[in-house]
Amino acid sequence: MKYTVNDHGYYGKFGGAFIPEMLHPNVEELRISYLSIIESPQFKKDFDYLLKNYVGRPTPLFLAERLSEKYKAKIYLKREDLCHTGAHKINNTIGQILLAKKLGKKKIIAETGAGQHGVATATVCALMGMECIVYMGQLDMERQRPNVERMRILGTKVVAATSGNMTLKDATNEAMRHWINNPTDTHYIIGSVVGPHPYPDMVARFQSVISDEIKTQLTAQEGNPFPDYVIACVGGGSNAAGAYYHFLDDEHVKLIGVEAAGKGVDTGESAATTALGKVGILHGSKSLLMQTEDGQVIEPYSISAGLDYPGIGPLHSHLFDTGRVQFISATDDEAMNAGIELSRLEGIIPAIESAHAVAVLGKLSLDEDDVVIVNLSGRGDKDLETYIRWGKY
Ligand SMILES: *Cc1c(COP(=O)(O)O)cnc(C)c1O
């Protein structure tokens, strides 16, 4: 298992837990207990039950015939867009809230940028009757008003972070501060495969249901559990980690990660971490991130809020470093065109994040009998304003 986390919380040279001393007890409690809890039969039973009956899993694996015809390969879409709340994120929030309950926590906190992770967290907190506070940068609150109101309807308190640029990083700082002050009764739900160990491993395990289902579904549809390619977009990396997970040691399965090039990798307005990043510490782990010569985090840019993140998690940093995953980037324009194309060819309007994954189909040299999985991480409802503003359809 070359690609799983080691006992010290590292993937190769990436990972670890670089946290303030004050947070140590919280993270240590998680580290010591997470595996025994999530591998217990009762936890698995509860998790599977909710994934099936609440989220709507298994999500379909759909053979996209018109897309296949266009790109001359057998292209399947893994329909995470059909999950309750519209994206894969809820797989993780369900797992973490069940874990928080087992740890006896009464309250949940989370940070959110565009609000998608906040909505998924608010949703499961309502379901479980847990008190929930979501920290969000004040600027993001103004930009993502519908998601703020969704969280409020669900009974979550949304707190504005008013320091710094008033965006995700500042919201993260506020959430950390809250956790330090409320260590015993509160669990902090991180929304991607980022943060200090054990978060990246924990989130990857919760999302691994995606590749588990793909294997079963491909066996039924193709008579073989292994595709030739798995393609997924990478923000922090959770939907990609889930889609790759059960194929990591099968080196004949080519894994493709798609980053947001924004206006172009060299324009200064990009979020293509592997192209531009260097090793550093971000949100509690050693990973690749976009930074200046003296180590200041560079503001990322992408048209899709979910990919607008200056780093990638430690697992993906390692997958890039070892060459196990090939990273490609797609610009805003390429992603928007791919989103319209998928809408026209298959009747599916994808999240703009997911459209980045579709956008690289034309950049791979595919064979007619290649079986290609595109992980469609979310649906486009939340992005309607962006599609309208872009206008070319
Ligand atoms: C949040 C989000 C992403 C990016 O996050 P990952 O952790 O990289 O998966 C991608 N797609 C959708 C639809 C999202 O909501």
Image (tube, rainbow, N blue to C red):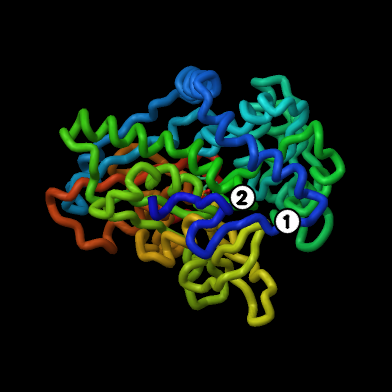
Helix, strand or loop under label 2 = loop
In the image: residue 242, left or right of residue 236: left
Marks 1 and 2, how far apart in space?
10 Å
* Numbered badge on residue 192: none
In the image: residue 344, left or right of residue 238: left
Please tell me which of labels 1 and 2 falls first in the chain: 1
| Residue closer to the observer: 3 or 145 | 3
* Residue 374 in sight in this render: yes
Residue at horizontal 50%, vertical 36%? 206
Amino acid type, residue under disc 1 in the picture:
Ile
| Residue closer to the observer: 237 or 206 | 206
Residue, disc 1: 19
58 up-or-down from 260: above or below: above
Within 10 angstroms of label 2, few (less than 14), some, or many (20 or more) residues? many
Helix, strand or loop under label 1 = loop
Residue at horizontal 53%, vertical 45%? 201
Q: Position of residue 124 (x, y in %)?
A: 63, 27
Q: Position of residue 158 (x, y in %)?
A: 78, 38
In the image: residue 322, left or right of residue 149: left
Within 10 angstroms of label 1, few (less than 14), some, or many (20 or more) residues? some
Amino acid type, residue under disc 2 in the picture:
His
C-beta proximity under 8 Å, tags 1 and 2: no
Q: Is mark 1 within 8 Å of ligand 1?
A: no
Outermost residue, front side:
7
* Numbered badge on residue 197: 2
Q: Position of residue 52 (x, y in %)?
A: 45, 21
Residue at horizontal 73%, vertical 33%? 108
Number of residue marks: 2
| Residue closer to the observer: 292 or 325 | 325
* Residue 147 in sight in this render: no
Residue at horizontal 60%, vertical 45%? 199
Q: Position of residue 82 (x, y in %)?
A: 44, 31
